[in-house]
Amino acid sequence: MSRFSSILEQNDVAQVFDLFETYQENSIYVVGGAIRDALLNREITDIDFATSLKPKTITEILNKENIKFIDVGIDHGTVTAIINERKFEITTFRNDIFTDGRHAQVSFSNSLEEDALRRDFTINAMYLDKGGNLIDPKDGKTDLENRVVRFIGNPDERIKEDYLRILRYIRFFLNYSNKKHNLDNVKFLKMNLD
């Protein structure tokens, strides 16, 4: 757990875990960037959560505890809780039903594994439970250790789902990779810039 103490020992994070775990065990996880940064011993600046609970349940729990929240992303499963003036995005596990290159229609899921499949890169599909256990269905930790930025599934499909992933790939490549670009990735990036 010491590797993730920079995340888990924050009082606000512990409060989110306690709140949701009291409602339903094993229902909420830290996801994505905070885990990447912890594994690389970088400063943790942003902490997001993923949960099996539906958005309506999330808002009910927050209301019951008198925690302010923003629900502008609720149609896509995201509720932003405001705890001690910090914002935490809490997003329901989901699947993409339809995408148009920028916007997605989603269905909600109970499955962490399904949620991981819809994410862009393996290094963004790592989850951390309250006990400090890393759940890594796409082997993002190995890619991070090897300094590789790898799309989940077919790169062309991932890019076509959301063209901003082109910029995200470049950003993540510059921040996390020390390898040459994968030629297939370059091909699909160029194809989708037209």
Image (tube, rainbow, N blue to C red):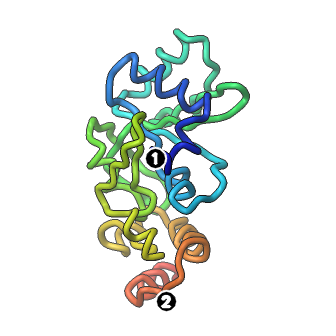
Q: Position of residue 169 (x, y in %)?
A: 52, 72
Residue 93 shows which numbered tag?
none
The amino acid at mark 1 is: Val
Residue toward you, 15 or 82:
15
Q: Position of residue 122 (x, y in %)?
A: 39, 63
Judging by the rendered image, the residue that carries numbered circle 2 is: 180
Q: Residue at x 43, y 76 (%)?
A: 146
Q: Is residue 10 left or right of residue 92?
A: right
Q: Position of residue 6 (x, y in %)?
A: 58, 45
Q: Residue at x 55, y 62 (%)?
A: 40
Q: How many marks?
A: 2
Q: Quadrant of residue 33?
A: bottom right
Q: Looking at the picture, does residue 129 appear above or below residue 33?
A: above
**Furthest-front residue in view?**
2
- Badge 2 density bin: few <14, some 14–19, many ≥20, Cα 10 Å: few
Q: Residue at x 55, y 50 (%)?
A: 34
Q: Position of residue 136 (x, y in %)?
A: 33, 54
Q: CA distance from mark 1 to mark 2?
A: 27 Å
Q: Quadrant of the N terminus?
A: top left
Residue 31 shows which numbered tag?
1
Q: Is residue 190 left or right of residue 85?
A: left
Q: Secondary structure at mark 2?
A: loop
Q: Looking at the picture, does residue 106 appear above or below residue 165?
A: above
Which of the two labelled residues, at mark 1 and mark 2, occupies the earlier sequence position?
1
Residue toward you, 140 or 117:
140
